[in-house]
Amino acid sequence: MRSIAKSIRDRQREGLDTDAVIFIVAVSMFLVSVIVDMSLLGIDTRVTQVLRYAGYGIILYKLVKDIYDRNTLVKYLVIFSMLIVGYVFNHNKVMLLYSLVVLATINIESKLLMKIYFAVQGMILLIIVTMSQLGMVLDYVNKSIDRTRHYLGFDHATTAPILFLFMLMEYIYIRKGKLTLLEYLAGMGIVTYFYKLTDTNMAFWICVATLTFFFIIQLWIDKGYITETFRYLLALSPWFAAALSIWAQYAFKAENATWMKLDEFFHTRLRLGYEAINTYGFSLFGRDITWIGSSFPDMNPKGYNYVDCSYLQIALQQGLIFLCIVLAMYSYIILKMTREKKYYGAWICVFISVFSMTEPRLVNVVFNPFVILALTIITTDVSEYVKRLEIKRKRAYG
């Protein structure tokens, strides 16, 4: 919270405090309302809905306030076009409302975005997990033959560790890819704690890989030799991750012993993906799909069909065109970060791409602020391009 206060003071000196305060209040209200809805705190959803819509209202106020600035107006038009395209593909007005958060980041520094997400996610996570361990909130324990999973005050066992994973990435972005030994050990301790209680494999291993990667080779990352050399390969990593994960689910064979062992390792994700492909099929523009998954208290819902893979879920529901747009966006941001020598940002996007092979967080703005960062950077670049074209036109015609 001190870092947020410092950011506000810095922006006040620059005369931009109003935008910063509006952004902090609106995004905080949005995050608190949605994450609390995923918890077992027992707060009436009508209360969180009012909080969420109040946040949307503040964002709309910011839009009206800034719309008279020509440069900002161009950015709004670009993002509004993106949102319309997203709505056409998403078949979901809730996602359109969530997209308003993207608009709130116009003229907001990326570092402040990460600080807000880190502070709000961290505060809620700490409160809910602590209350669950003190018995103040239900810590549901799901016991099966091979796994015992604590839900830590949330409606699903994966929520807490995945929140922490993205908090870790936000922190690394704020620290520009540098971790001290103390930070590394503290991160590993928290990750291990979540793993022992929730048995969330992918989040655990991506956390370990991210921490170790940035701690051990941060000097090489800072110099940029590795990133610059393999920048195009890194930019293609989201495409590789999408192709591999979708192919594995498409090629799955229930009668093959090797495939069955792989499916067991991934906790039936391959089988569920295979069934979803056969049920819904691929299309350019997607289709309306009601995903049915297990969460407390309904642990064995009828008609379970949930697909955890971000890439397959997007391909089936939003369509192949929208999936290509998302992948191109991630490729662009990786190259952009590399050109700006923010190598840590490029590598974070690579880790998110790998993680999204088994978790549906690639475009989830509640967990993942990097998709917002990507959209705002693209919007700024388009706005600057339009400005350059206008300058050339004025020069050409006097």
Image (spheres, rainbow, N blue to C red):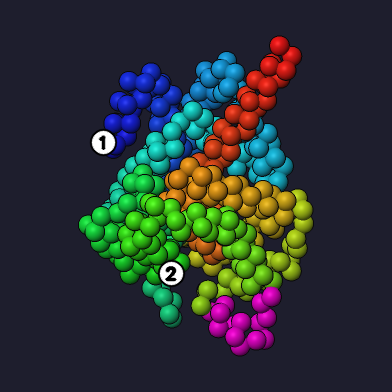
Query: Which is nearer the eye, 19 or 378?
Result: 378
Query: Which is nearer the eye, 318 or 340?
Result: 340
Question: Going 50% across and 48% down the picture, which residue do you hit?
Answer: 338
Q: Which residue is mark 1?
A: 2
Q: Is residue 338 left or right of residue 323?
A: left
The part of the chain drawn in magenta is: 251-264
Say whether residue 88 is magenta.
Answer: no
Quadrant position of residue 14: top left
Q: Residues within 10 Å of mark 1 (few under 14, many from 20)?
A: few
- Amino acid bearing label 2: Asn
Considering the image in quadrants, where does the C terminus appear? top right
Q: Which residue is mark 2?
A: 201
- Give me the C-alpha separation between circle 2 and circle 1: 33 Å
Q: Secondary structure at mark 2?
A: helix
- Amino acid bearing label 1: Arg
Q: Main secondary structure of the magenta part?
A: helix
